[in-house]
Amino acid sequence: MAATLILYKSEYYLFLNSVDYFITPMLFTIVTFNCPKIKEEQHMDSAVKKGATRRDFLYLTAGAMGAVGVGSAAWPLIDSMNPAADTLAMASTDVDISKVPVGQAIIAVWRGAPVFIRHRTPDEIASVRKDNEWETLRDPQKDEDRVTKAEWIILKGVCTHLGCIPLGTKPGQPRGDFNGWFCPCHGSHYDVSGRVRKGPAPKNLHVPEYKFVTDTLVRIG
Ligand code: FES
């Protein structure tokens, strides 16, 4: 009897131990895996982590693609800022002016821009050299300081307002109120020295660098 009790007791003890070591963790695991609340929390946690990871990945990818895109888009712009080979080749240009009659003008092309070359009459020269009239102009400049030879005015043919090409070089074109050039874009008037007299242009027509190689050959640039 006593031996039986001892045996029962030892089996009971073993049973309790097995509950402690195996059954309790097993039950806990089963409950944990099957509890809807816990599953929901785990799912949310995992979704948040996945979301963050995916979001980070998307940010990085978008950033990298954006950098590549900006680089690709910027390159043609940067590349276009380099002067073309034909433009470099035209750093200066020689123009034969022997066939330009007094009172007439021609348009040369220098660095892709028009250049007006006008053979002025004595009256035209006198009209832009009146006393100290130049001091009252919007962009005060003496005619004498804008020419090398009084009979030749050489100007970059680009309006200083917004860059249109003023009229007045070809025969029959309007020359504006001061017998020089007229920009029809917004109505700027330039005199025979290319100085702005009326309209929105803020500056006189630009005088490019030039020199007379001979009496009839001028080098622009
Ligand atoms: S561009 Fe010549 S007046 Fe505006």
Image (tube, rainbow, N blue to C red):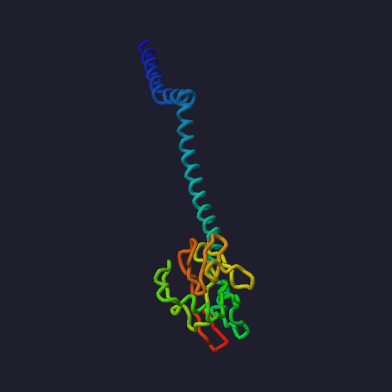
Above or below, 165 relative to 108: above
| In front of the other: 66 or 158 | 158
The residue sitting at the bottom extreme is 214
Going by the image, does 111 lie left or right of 19? right
Residue 45 point in image, percent of width and height: 45, 33
Residue at figure coordinates x 50%, y 79% from the top left: 125
Q: Is residue 32 above or below residue 214?
A: above
Q: Looking at the rendering, which quadrant does residue 130 occupy?
A: bottom left
Residue in the foreground of this view, choosing between 59 and 125: 125
Residue appearing at x 53%, y 56% in the figure: 68
Q: Looking at the image, is 78 positioned above or below residue 24?
A: below
User: 214 or 128: which is nearer to us?
Assistant: 128
Along the horizontal axis of the image, is 114 left or right of 21?
right
Quadrant assignment for the N terminus: top left
Q: Position of residue 20 (x, y in %)?
A: 39, 23
Numbered-mark total: 0
The residue depicted at 63 percent of the width and 84 percent of the height is 99
x then y, percent, for residue 180: 54, 71
Q: In x, y percent, where is residue 163?
A: 53, 64
Q: Nearer the viewer, residue 201 or 49?
A: 201
Q: Residue at x 51, y 69 (%)?
A: 190
